Image (spheres, rainbow, N blue to C red):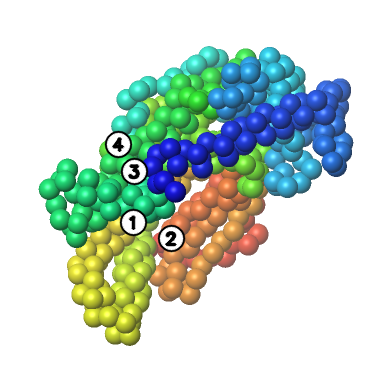
Amino acid sequence: MGNGIGFALAWVLPPVVLVVLAGAASGEWMWRVTRYRVGDERFHVHTGVVVRKRLALRRERIRTVDLTADPVLRVLGAATVRVGTGEQAGTEGSVTLWPLRRTDAEALRATLLAHAARPEVSAAGSGTAGEEGSPDGTLVRFDRRWIRFAPLSFLTPALGAAAAGGLIQVSEWFGLQDELFEAIGSWFGLAPAVLVAVAMGVGLFVAGGVATVALWVESWWNHTLDRQSDGTLHVRRGLLTTRSITLEEARLRGVEVVEPLAARLAGGARVDAVATGLAQGEEDKTDSQILLPVAPEELADRVAADVLREPDSPTAVPLRGHPVAARGRRLRWALATVLATETVLVLLGVLLTPVLLHIAWSSALVLVPVAVLLALDAYRALGHALTERYLVARSGTVRRATVALQRRGIVGWTVRQSVFQRRAGLVTVLATTAAGSGAYAVRDAAEADGLALADAAVPGLLAPFLEPVSAPAPHPPAR
């Protein structure tokens, strides 16, 4: 039995061909057994092979109509249409039509979202002045310079480790492990004992970076954000698999500017929509709410302002700092995490091997200062502000997020105060909303500041539950 490339292809190609043929046959069959009809009040769908399904969605409940086309569907001029009502995945509140002709899919989306009208946007929007500064048309178009932010992701080491491990595993399957190590070792002039560490390092930072860039390009190539005349925001993106996502402006309740740590150090940020109708369990929910991938921070602020029809982005306003006690809490959390990790290593070292004891003290020399720096950065990120129309809150360090939530979209408040927060005079206030993640927190604010903020954001909602509190602790100036 041979172990060469021909033997490997003989095992790999037939299953791939069978999968492609099965997929094509399944698509042809589903196309023949699926019927749909758009009525004045309901969208009717009849589908199924073994089990027949008849769905009827009320048109006013339809929140999203997204189009996706993988390379095969693009060649065939077809697309997958996902119609959602904003309910949890797994319910009868969403339906997927696969495949439809591209022209039919575009027409179906336009018909189902025809109830989105400009007057509704004006009533729900942020004002005439903002609308004059943000007309219909293209808000942002893809720029190849954004690709430089792609490798600045936690996916890079993860994909690199997976690539290195996969290469070693495959070479072992086909008996090529020794030949692989010898070949790579001859390139670097290294002994096999050192080769494994070098190969893993190269896999982490080279293969991981290449894989991350490839995934990013496939997902975000030709990204375009448009405002349509029917009162919707339209996102189009994708290289091999194209995606077309539509969001009604009337369901927009704000935006969130997200700055992952590595991208933030390079001056990058992305923009997410805070909107109703995006179910928590819905497939591709996270990608569906992204209006702008990681791009220069100045561009992210401009896009946030344009999306909200504001002259300036609320996410860029100066924020009120939080008390020094909040810094102490973050330092204690960070050091406690390091202590827990080192304790586990020490216990394993005592029970198993002294090597882990050496790893414990050497890793502590790195983890302690890193934890302190992250804790201080998390404290500097804390802040909140209240504008005429928005509640603005920022927190986080590995994932710093600044949310601008429309005050009219706040439907309730949750006030949390642990024993340690009570002793420090701090409180966490969560604004409850039907949009986005469902709640957005102002973390570790001074007790008087947090309660006053909630009362001022939605006057009268929290007032019956308020009691007189002492003056707030000293806090840093606005930043």
Q: Which of marks 2 and 1 precedes in the sequence?
A: 1
**Label 3, label 2: how far apart the Cα atoms are:** 37 Å
Confirm or deny contact between disc 3 and disc 2 (CB under 8 A).
no
Q: Which residue is mark 1?
A: 379
What is the secondary structure assignment of the residue under circle 4? loop
Q: Are marks 2 and 4 in contact (CB under 8 Å)?
A: no
Three-letter code for the amino acid on which mark 3 is drawn: Gly
Rendered location of residue 135, percent (x, y): 53, 15
Q: Secondary structure at mark 1?
A: helix
Q: Which residue is mark 4?
A: 267
Q: Is residue 299 above or below residue 85?
A: above
Q: Is residue 124 above or below residue 188?
A: above
Kind of residue sitting beneath label 2: Asp
In the drawing, does residue 133 fall left or right of residue 57?
left
Mark 1, Cα crowd under 10 Å, few <14 / some 14-19 / many 20+, is: many
Mark 3 or mark 4: which is in front?
3
SS at mark 2? strand
Instruction: Give the amino acid type for the residue marked by disc 4 in the picture.
Output: Gly
Residue at the spot 66% in from the left edge and 17% down from the top edge: 102
Residue denoted by label 3: 208
Alpha-carbon distance for marks 2 and 4? 26 Å
Seen at 33% across and 85% down, the residue is: 351
Quadrant of residue 70 within the rendered picture: top right
- Of the residues under marks 3 and 4, which one precedes in the sequence? 3
What residue is pinned by disc 2? 444
For discs 3 and 2, the disc positioned in front in the rendered view? 3
